[in-house]
Amino acid sequence: MLSLTQAQNIKTIQLRPLGENQFSAIVPLGSVLELSFDDLDADSKEYQYKIEHMTPDWEPSNLIANQYINGFEQNYISNVSNSFNTLQNYSHYSVQIPNQSTLITKSGNYLLSVLDEYDEILFTRRFVFYENTTTVGVAVYRSRDTKTINEQQTIQFSINYPGIRINNPSQEISVSLIQNNNWNTAINNLQPQFLRPNQLLYKYTRETNFWGGNEYLHFDNKYIRNTSLNIAKTEQKEIFHNYLYIDEPRAENIYTYNPDINGQFVVRTLDGKNPETEADYAMLHFALEALEPYKNKDVYVFGAFNNFELNTENKMTYNKEAKFYEAEIALKQGFYNYSYATINENGIVDLSEIDGSFYQTENEYTVIVYYKPFGEIYHRVIGVGNGFFDQNK
C-alpha cells in the first residue's frame, strides 16, 4: 500500500466506465472504460498508454500482445484540452479503452500504464474485463470469529457454472475478493470448501474476513469560493485554499451511520458547465486532532483520489503548537471521500487505528473468478459477483 509519489504535475487520475457515478473498473468484456487525468504543467505533452494482460497475481501473463489485442497495445493519447477560466492552469487528457486502435479480445486482468516522452512510466491503473459465463452469489455477514465479531465482516459466496466443464477446481479456479474497489487489501487465491454439481461453495469464517473500517469522511468544494460541506474557511491566494474542519479520531466512538461513496470522488463545479476543464484546483488543508503524536508511526490521509495509496504527497506532519496533524493536498473541485491511516516503523499499515473498525460499516465486496483449464496459457475471468453488508443479517 505504501508507494512512491507519482509525478507532481499529474493529478485527478480516473479510470471508470462511461456513465455517471460509475467507479469500478471491473466490467464485462466489450465495455468501454475512460482514462482521464490532468497535467498541471498546462503544456502539450506526448503521453502514451500501454496495456498489458496480467495473471491473477498481477504479474505479466504468458500472452503476447497480438493474442489479446487487435491493434496496438501502446499508443498516443491524442484527446487533449486546456482548462478554461481557472486559477490553476492544466491540460486535461483522456482516452477510451478499447478504441479503434486498441481492441481487447480476451477477458482477464489488465494493467494500464501511462508513459511520458522518454517511455518512463508515470502511473499505472488496474482494470478487469470479465465474461458472464458463471453466476456468482455473494453474501456479507458480521464476523463469526468471536475475537473480531464487533470489528470485522465475513464474505461467503458461491460460483455456479452450468455451462463450463471444470475438472479440477482447486487447480483450474482461483478467486480474488476486493473491498470497496481497493486492490491494496484484496484477498487472493481462495480455494472452494465444498463441491456440488456445477457449483463451488466458499463458506469460510476467517479466511474471507475484512476489517469493517468506518464510513468515510467527506467534503464538497464544488463552490470553491465559499465555505461549504465540511469546509470551515476559504482563502484566495495563488489558487483557492480550502480549510477543512479539524477531524477527531473515531476509533473510540460508537458506530454512527454516515452515507458515503466508499472512498471515491466525483469531480464537479458550480462555476462552469464542463467539470473536465472548468473545475478549478484548490489546496485542501486536512487536520487531524492529536494531543500527542503517534509514537513511532506516520499518519496519512487517503482515498480513491490517490488510489488508496500512502505516499509522501499525502503524508501528514505533526503541529506541536496546534496539537494536530496537518497536510496540504491540491485537489480538483468536487465531492471527496477520505480516511486516515498509520504506518509503524516496520512498515505495517493500520487503516483502523484512527477511524476505528465496525462490523456495521456499509462496504461493497467484489468477487472475481479466474479460470485456467489444464493446457491453457492464461487466466480467463469467467464471472464477477457483488455484495453489500446488511446489518439485518
Image: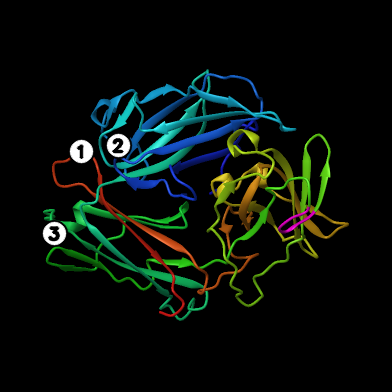
Q: Pick whichever, 13 or 205, lies toward us.
A: 13
Look at the magenta stretch and give its main secondary structure: loop
Q: Position of residue 246 (x, y in %)?
A: 77, 60
Determine whether 240 is above or below 245 in the image: above
User: Seen from this angle, which residue lies furthest front?
Assistant: 273
Residue picked out by circle 2? 61
Q: Is residue 376 visible?
A: yes
Give amino acid for label 2.
Ser
Q: Residues within 10 Å of mark 3 (few under 14, many from 20)?
A: few
Q: Residues within 10 Å of mark 2 (few under 14, many from 20)?
A: some
The answer to whether mark 2 and mark 1 are in CB contact below 8 A is yes
> Going 77% across and 62% down the picture, which residue do you hit?
289
Q: Earlier in the sequence, mark 3 or mark 1?
A: 3
> Going 41% across and 28% down the picture, which residue do you hit?
50
Give amino acid for label 3.
Pro
Residue picked out by circle 3? 162
Q: Earlier in the sequence, mark 2 or mark 1?
A: 2
- Disc 3 on helix, strand or loop? loop
Residue picked out by circle 1? 377
Q: Pick whichever, 243 or 146, lies toward us.
A: 243
Is 19 included in the stretch rendered in magenta?
no
